[in-house]
Amino acid sequence: MSTPEKKRIRGRLIFFSLLALGLLLAAVFADRLTPFDPNAQDMSASLQAPGGVHLAGTDRFGRDMFSRILVGLRTSLLATLTLVAVITVAGTVAGVLAGYLGGAPDAVLMRISDVCLAFPGLVFAMAIAALLNGGIGNAVLALALISWPKYARIARSQTLTVKSSNYIAAVRLSGSGPVKMIGKHILPNILGPVLVTSMLDIGTMLMELAGLSFLGLGAQPPTAELGNMMSGGRSMLQTYPWVVLGPGVAIFITVVVFNLLGDAVRDYLDPHSGKR
Amino acid sequence: MSETVLKTENLTKIFMVRGKKAFAAVDHVSFQLKKGETLGIIGESGCGKSTLAKLLCRLQEPTEGTVELCGQDITKARGAELCSAYRHIQMVFQDPVSSFDPRKTLGDGIGESLRNTGKSRREAELRVRELLKQCGLPGEFAGRYPHEVSGGQCQRAAIARALAVEPEVLICDESTSALDVTVQKKIMELLGRLRVDTGISCIFICHNLALVQDFCDRLLVMYQGKIIEEGTPDEVIFCPKEAYTQMLVDSVLG
């Protein structure tokens, strides 16, 4: 009955996985794909319009925009994926422990996460990043500090649901200890919603990281990063728009692809969408 | 026939309702279960039968009282001590499908306790097949997932899981209530046969008087957390002493 629907969902998943894979490969092999050295300055060729030798034009120092976008994509994507991995793992560990142990550990972990949530997110991240003196690593750390509670909450509520289920009671009767219980029975059963959230977060986190870099709190020049490349060209938006639009379009495409991939994963895992 | 395998004294569980009002779900329950005996516990929904079952195998902590299993007090057992107690007491739940981890095969579920007692993967697999056959399922069911089998088949697998460690006491908490009548009958036959084969002691929690009448050696009637009447099924059903028991009997037979 729902077979065509199922096929469509799977098709969408495969399509967006391939697109995301393409972006990832472009980022990983950026060094070999770049037609020019992304940091080589050539003042005689500065601010050339897209087309010709320089596919996406050049910036004010005559650096090839296309090469810089590729390398910038690598910086942005690598930082974003690290960030999402860190908050997913940290949040899940905290949430599962809080949910499983209950009592005092639960109260302490959840109050800490409340404190982190009480500050307006990006403003708090800016404060931390400024305090830590910029740099992409510190921007990742700042965003991780404000983003993990979301995962902790999801993991905790899922753990509480699973913990009260019959099969966990049955597992307990089988004489399994807490490590086996969490590793073999709780984690596999809560991972679905957590992973979908992290897939959907890749786009958001990429934007926030680029945002911090745009404000000068993330990657520092001359490192190519999509956010600080946009920042570098912002005064030339009206005269030489490609310097801003190039990295802007790259951010746009990346965010859209990863968001749609997240949606596709969610639809695929949703038990009501016809699968299982 | 005279050895006591499970004994409770003044077992009590009090729930706090919204932090102030105390509600005794199980109220000073004391009874003994002899080796090879089948004890039925009957009563209406909400009378504390299931809470009592959970207290017996320490899935919930009693507020007061003790549970003694095979001569050992397990009321305060934790960690490894409690795990070893679970080699003597097992439970079959009401809803069979939800009592298996949806991401693990039935064989994994049945074999988990065997693996925990130090059997190798190979040994456990062989034993699981044996247990499934004993419970009337083909050995291939070890590779199936809970959502791939029917309720009755799943309950058979749950019984196989409970029997894996060869426990002395089996608690059946409404184990047939979620199944339709014909399947119910077959599961009862299976339990009856296993009882003879293994000499296991059973606590059979049920609200269906007709089922317990033939199956149990002794009956406890529970009402609002207390045991209000005790006796053989015939005594309880045909000459009840309490008005509540009379009502319970009338509602089924009358």
Image (cartoon, coloured by chain):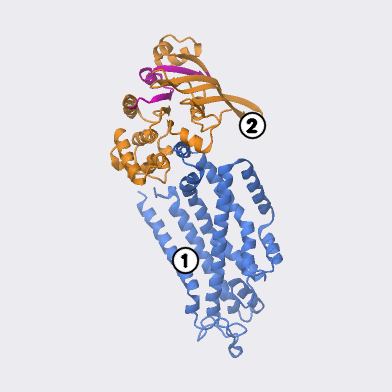
Residue shown at 71%/65% (left/top)?
A: A131
- The three-letter code of the residue at mark 2 reads Arg
Chain B's colour is orange
* Circle 2 chain: B
Residue A135, numbered label: none
Which residues are the magenta region? B198-226
| The image quarter in which residue B217 lies | top left
Magenta residue check for B200 = yes
Above or below, comparing residue B81 to residue B36 in the picture = below
Q: Please name the residue that numbered disc 2 is placed on.
A: B18
Residues tagged by mark 2 and mark 1 found on one chain of the structure: no
Above or below, comparing residue B78 to residue A105 in the picture = above
Question: Which chain gets the blue colouring?
Answer: A
Q: Please name the residue that numbered disc 1 is placed on.
A: A20
Magenta residue check for A240 = no
Along the viewing direction, whichever of A174 and A79 lies nearer the viewer:
A174
Residue A50 coordinates in the image, percent (x, y): 54, 82
Cα separation, mark 2 vs mark 1, equals 50 Å
